[in-house]
Image: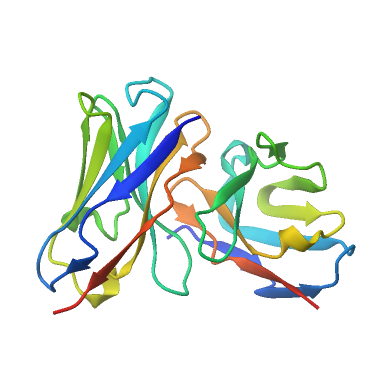
Amino acid sequence: QLQLQESGPGLVKPSETLSLTCTVSGGSISVTSYYWAWIRQPPGKGLEWIGSMYYSGSNSYYNPSLKSRVTISVDTSKNQFSLKMSSVTAADTAVYYCARQLVALNYFDYWGQGTLVTVSS
Amino acid sequence: EFVLTQSPGTLSLSPGERATLSCRASQSISSNYLAWYQQKSGQAPRLLIYAASSRAAGIPDRFSGSGSGTDFTLTISRLEPEDYAVYYCQQPGTFGQGTKVEIK
C-alpha cells in the first residue's frame, strides 16, 4: 500500500523560505504514469493546487499564482520529493499535502496526511 | 481564469436521503479530467470519482458521478452517517470551493 508522509518545520518566519519533503513508501517514485504534487489548504478554507512534477524532473507545472515563489524537486535515490516556497507571508499559513497524480487523467489518488505550516514571527 | 463553482455551499439532509451536489465549470472541459473528493474534518481528501463517472477503488456504489461539458454532478443515493463531510470537485490545476453535507 502506497504511503506518503510530509515532513518539515511547522513554523516559518515571514519573508523566509518554506521547505517541506514528502517521503514515499510502499512503491517507487520513479514510475512513468504519475506526477508528484503539492496541494495546500488554509485553515477553514478550500484546496489549492501548488504544483506537480514528473519523477525525472523533465516536466513540472505550477499554479500561475504561486509560480514565481515555488520550486518542486524530486530525489529518486531517497524516494522523496520536495517543495520550496520563498518569501512567505501569513497568507501562506496552511496544511500542506503531498499527493500522487495520475498523468493521464490528472486526479490525485494517494495523499499524505498533511502538515500544518504556520507563518509567524 | 478557469473557475469551478460548486453549489450549494451547504446541504442539510437526513440519513437515508439523496444528496445532489453540483460543479459548474467556467468553460467546457473534458469529462476525463473531472474528479470528486471527500474530506472529513482533520483528514486528507479522499478520491471518490474520476473521469466524471468512474468510482475509485473501494468507493461504495451509493456514490455516483455524471455530467459533461460545463455541468457535473455528484450524487449520494442514500446518505450514511459516514458521508457527512465536505466534497470538492477538481479539474487539472483547480479545485471547486467545496460543498458541505451536514446532518439535518
Count of marks, rendered view: 0
User: Image quadrant for the C terminus of chain B?
Assistant: bottom right
Q: Is residue A65 above or below residue A81?
A: below
User: Viewer-proximal residue, B67 or A92?
Assistant: A92
- Which residue is drawn at the image coordinates 59% and 61% (left, top)? B40
Residue B69 coordinates in the image, percent (x, y): 66, 47
Whether residue A22 sits left or right of residue B84 in the image: it is left
- Which residue is drawn at the image coordinates 80% and 55% (left, top)? B76
Is residue A55 visible from the viewing direction of this image?
Answer: yes
Q: Is residue B95 above or below residue A78?
A: below
**Direction right: furthest residue:** B16
Q: Is residue B83 above or below residue B32?
A: below
Residue A100 coordinates in the image, percent (x, y): 43, 37
User: Image quadrant for the N terminus of chain B?
Assistant: bottom left
Residue B95 coordinates in the image, percent (x, y): 50, 57
User: Viewer-proximal residue, B88 or B14?
Assistant: B14
- Which residue is drawn at the image coordinates 43% and 23% (left, top)? A33
Q: Quadrant of residue A68?
A: bottom left
* Colouring scheme applied when the structure was drawn: rainbow
Q: Is residue A64 above or below residue A92?
A: above
Residue B41 coordinates in the image, percent (x, y): 56, 66
Is residue B35 visible from the viewing direction of this image?
Answer: no
Whether residue A68 sits left or right of residue B27 in the image: it is left
